[in-house]
């Protein structure tokens, strides 16, 4: 959701241009601040940022993105196994044109990943289907942990050859990626996608590798448990590791068409039984990667009206509550990738005094005296302040 001022918006950010009456009310009722979720030296992404948001210092607990997603899929990672995030991507003329294989459907993707596992899998390599374009590949070679791998959403439009994994042992990973292209480019699913005018998922891209994660339970750290609503395996896996319950919501897709209202209603249902719920929405990030300003503004407005508004209006009828709203990281639409910039947050509720700021935006947050250089401290303050 966080972004930079844009010329086409008369110097406003998408968050400032969007109609966000509910997040603005959270700001008016409580406080606005700025928090750095990506510590120095870490690549900006939801893996690092979500650890920070949940109150876990990435400098202590981060072991890679893929192991967190593997946890959601129930994949056991032994000491010699390295998990890679496995994107289904679109390659055209040896250039990366789509990091998501045209946001391929779950069913099509599962068939392709299982096909690759039959053709390329074995004792040392295993492919596991996930959701849409997001999957896992596990390789039995501990040395691969040190490879330099680039996320595909960072290199849209660039040549494949200039961005392949590098370092000792990289050739076996590169060979898997190149072999996948030979197998997938003429697959019947991709022929049908091309006939329908959709991008084919004609290659895999391996990145975000790591080993098994061990995280202390959320309840042990903060004294409460609860649930998590997200369509993204990374978030589901991370929260599963810390003992929060993943809540499956019909219609939650992780894209523009996600069912915002269902997410809000399931969150309120969770709060009838549990003291805490986290609701994660991916659509603004996807719009940023796609360079789609209209969809980004719409996603922010849908989030504000259908999720923040629904939950806030219900919580305001309770004798005591706290509500926190924030992005995990910035994804400037001009760059179409993540940055390490601090993100704005707003919170309101029990014992949180108003700071007389009545707008939720990057600009207002930057002016606030409430600045957290270690974003991982935010959750503890939110729960225990």
Image (spheres, rainbow, N blue to C red):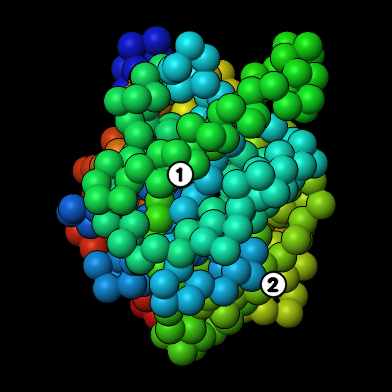
Q: Alpha-carbon distance for marks 1 and 2?
A: 38 Å
Q: Which sits in the foreground, 83 or 215? A: 83
Q: In this view, does 57 lie to the left or right of 45?
A: left
* Disc number for residue 238: none
* Above or below, 326 relative to 15: below
- 334 w.r.t. 26: above or below: above
Query: Where, by quadrant of the figure, is residue 48 drawn?
Result: bottom left
**Quarter of the image containing the C terminus?**
bottom left
Give the labeled residue for mark 2.
271
Q: Residue 206 carries which label?
A: 1
The x and y percentages for residue 153 are 43, 32
Residue 381 lies, in percent from the top left, at 35, 73
**N-term-proximal mark, 1 vs 2:** 1
Q: What element carries label 2?
A: helix
Q: Where is residue 27 in the image (x, y as percent from the top left)?
A: 43, 50
Q: What element carries label 1?
A: strand
Which residue does the image show at 53% across and 46% down from the upper left?
86
């Amino acid at each position: 959701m966080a972004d930079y001022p844009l010329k086409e918006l008369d110097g406003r950010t998408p968050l400032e241009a969007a109609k966000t009456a509910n997040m603005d009310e959270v700001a008016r009722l409580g406080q606005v601040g700025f928090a750095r979720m990506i510590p120095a030296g870490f690549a900006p992404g939801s893996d690092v940022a979500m650890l920070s948001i949940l109150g876990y210092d990435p400098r202590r607990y981060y072991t890679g993105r893929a192991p967190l997603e593997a946890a959601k899929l129930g994949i056991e990672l032994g000491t010699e196994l390295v998990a890679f995030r496995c994107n289904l991507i679109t390659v055209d003329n040896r250039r990366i044109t789509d990091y998501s294989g045209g946001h391929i459907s779950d069913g099509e993707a599962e068939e392709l990943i299982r096909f690759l596992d039959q053709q390329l899998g074995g004792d040392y390599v295993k492919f596991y289907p996930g959701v849409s374009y997001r999957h896992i590949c596990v390789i039995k070679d501990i040395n691969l942990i040190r490879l330099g791998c680039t996320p595909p959403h960072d290199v849209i439009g660039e040549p494949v050859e200039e961005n392949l994994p590098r370092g000792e042992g990289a050739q076996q990973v590169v060979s898997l990626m190149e072999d996948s292209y030979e197998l997938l480019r003429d697959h019947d699913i991709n022929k049908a996608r091309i006939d329908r005018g959709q991008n084919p998922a004609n290659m895999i891209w391996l990145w975000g590798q790591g080993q098994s994660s061990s995280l202390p339970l959320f309840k042990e750290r903060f004294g409460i448990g609860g649930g998590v609503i997200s369509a993204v395996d990374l978030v589901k896996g991370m929260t599963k590791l810390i003992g929060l319950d993943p809540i499956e919501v019909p219609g939650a897709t992780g894209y523009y068409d996600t069912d915002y209202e269902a997410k809000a209603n399931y969150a309120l249902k969770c709060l009838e039984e549990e003291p805490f719920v986290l609701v994660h929405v991916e659509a603004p990030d996807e719009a940023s990667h796609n360079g789609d300003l209209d969809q980004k503004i719409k996603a922010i407005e849908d989030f504000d009206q259908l999720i923040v508004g629904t939950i806030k209006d219900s919580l305001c009828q309770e004798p005591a509550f706290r509500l926190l709203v924030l992005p995990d990281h910035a994804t400037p639409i001009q760059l179409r990738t993540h940055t390490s910039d601090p993100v704005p947050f707003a919170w309101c509720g029990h014992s949180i005094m108003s700071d007389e700021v009545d707008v939720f935006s990057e600009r207002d947050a930057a002016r606030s005296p409430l600045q957290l250089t270690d974003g991982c401290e935010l959750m503890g303050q939110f729960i225990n302040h």
